[in-house]
Amino acid sequence: MIVCTEPQEAARLALALGDYALVNRITASEECLKAIYTYSESMLCSVCSGDVGERRFACKQIQRLGILAVSALIDNLSSMNNTIAEECFQNLSMMRSEQLISEIIKRTRNADSPRKKSALIWSLGKMTEQRDPLVPGRECMNESESFRLADTLIRPFLKSLKESETDKDVLATIEQAFKELERAFDGRLKPMDAKSIAELKKLLEQDK
């Protein structure tokens, strides 16, 4: 299993498992899925490491596992550790699909605390963001499909939830989620245009 291998082999195995799951959906045994869940949680803990290399490896491993890491990511959205929670939000946003959004909506309906419900709602608000994956072969859903799912799944659900919800913190999160969907943050790296390059060169010349 992944936990028994050296880093290079662990990376290869995680990528192979994630690739297989993307093509064949999740067909692993319950025992294997539990092991992957435990490993995914250990990688989330490593995201907080003081070692830069360990942090980056952990972030990449989560993306390599892809949809196999989803359960652990959803369960840790409400983590008291902000670094872990943010890693979960960003990865779920990047891995989004109609199936994943439907699962988060289901979890939101069944959430047993306002904190968990708010975290799940916030993750729905992130589903129009664009990000660059750290791992080749992992892609973020394009803008048009993301907005389609936001219009057909997320906004109707949030609107319905707003009408029945009584917790003020949850209601505030719903309002913010609507704003985030509209904002559609773009975290992708963009090539510098000619003007920006010229300005950078000028600044560098001044520093000499």
Image (cartoon, rainbow, N blue to C red):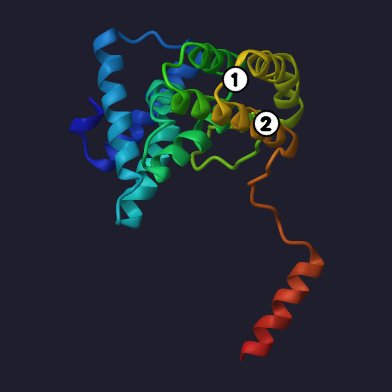
* Mark carried by residue 10: none
**Residue 129 pos. (x, y %):** 65, 36
**Residue 80 pos. (x, y %):** 37, 39
Secondary structure under badge 2? helix
The C terminus, quarter of image: bottom right
**Residue 196 pos. (x, y %):** 76, 68
* Label 2 environment density (alpha carbons within 10 Å; few <14, some 14–19, many ≥20): some
x 35%, y 34%: residue? 12
The amino acid sitting under disc 1 is: Ser
Image vertical order of residue 144 relative to residue 206, above or below: above
* Mark carried by residue 97: 1
The answer to whether marks 2 and 1 mark residues whose Cβ atoms lie closer than 8 Å is: no
Q: Which residue position holds label 2?
A: 175
Q: Of residues 195 and 155, which is closer to you in this image?
A: 155
The N terminus, quarter of image: top left
The amino acid sitting under disc 2 is: Glu
Q: Is residue 79 visible?
A: yes
* Cα gap from disc 2 to disc 1, whole angstroms: 23 Å
